[in-house]
Amino acid sequence: MPSPNFDSRPDNARIKLIVVHGISLPPGEYGGGHIRKFFCNRLDAGEHAYFESICEMRVSAHCLIERDGSIVQFVSFRERAWHAGASEWRGETACNDFSVGIELEGCDDEAYEVEQYASLAGLVAALRNRYPEIAADALAGHSDIAPGRKTDPGPAFDWSRLKRMISGRSGGVA
Ligand SMILES: [Zn+2]
């Protein structure tokens, strides 16, 4: 589902980080397709009071993983999606330049679905295969790269579960 919210990565940018996000629209509600619309600038401000405050925002992620594990891609991995905002990872700022952004439909304090972990683990494995500069530990939450400003994917996101599922996919080889 192509989003217009992207631009080119800087010429020398290497893809070396995966950023995990959480989002629900309206907050706390799942389904309805509002996140897809949001990333494509088609959110209807009249549909919910909260939408009025965000419908002019121009943001995106490379992929969204919905509650049933469905993966929707909005931006080519070669291009720069607009998901991280002001951010820093290991001393480098502007993480959008060198990262892939993956949104999970969810809330900071509610368990994510097993189907979402499975889809994310598969996506991470595929991305590492395609972009070998993404190191095994180059996984960050939005809250890790924008501390104090962002809280997603939140304490409900089980990083050790994700890492187990990723290593399970690669036969236990790191
Ligand atoms: Zn985020």
Image (cartoon, rainbow, N blue to C red):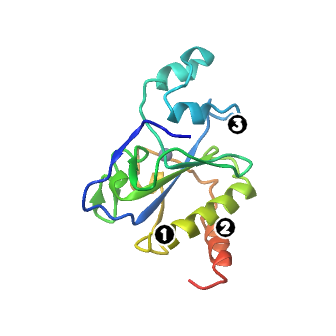
Q: Nearer the viewer, residue 4 or 142?
A: 4
Q: Regarding mark 3 in the picture, which secondary structure is present there?
A: loop
Q: Position of residue 79 (x, y in %)?
A: 39, 51
Q: Which residue is mark 3?
A: 30
- Label total for image: 3
Q: Say if disc 3 is inside 8 Å of ligand 1.
A: no
Q: Position of residue 51 (x, y in %)?
A: 55, 23
First-in-chain label (3 vs 2): 3
What is the crowding at mark 1: few (fewer than 14 residues within 10 Å), some, or many (at least 20)? few
Asked whether the residues under the numbered discs 3 and 2 touch, taking CB atoms below 8 Å apart as contact, a structural biologist would say: no
Mark 3: which amino acid? Answer: Tyr
The answer to whether 122 is drawn above or below residue 36 in the figure is: below
Q: Which residue is mark 1?
A: 130
Q: Which residue is mark 2?
A: 161
Quadrant of the rendered image containing residue 29: top right
Mark 2: which amino acid? Answer: Arg
What is the crowding at mark 2: few (fewer than 14 residues within 10 Å), some, or many (at least 20)? few
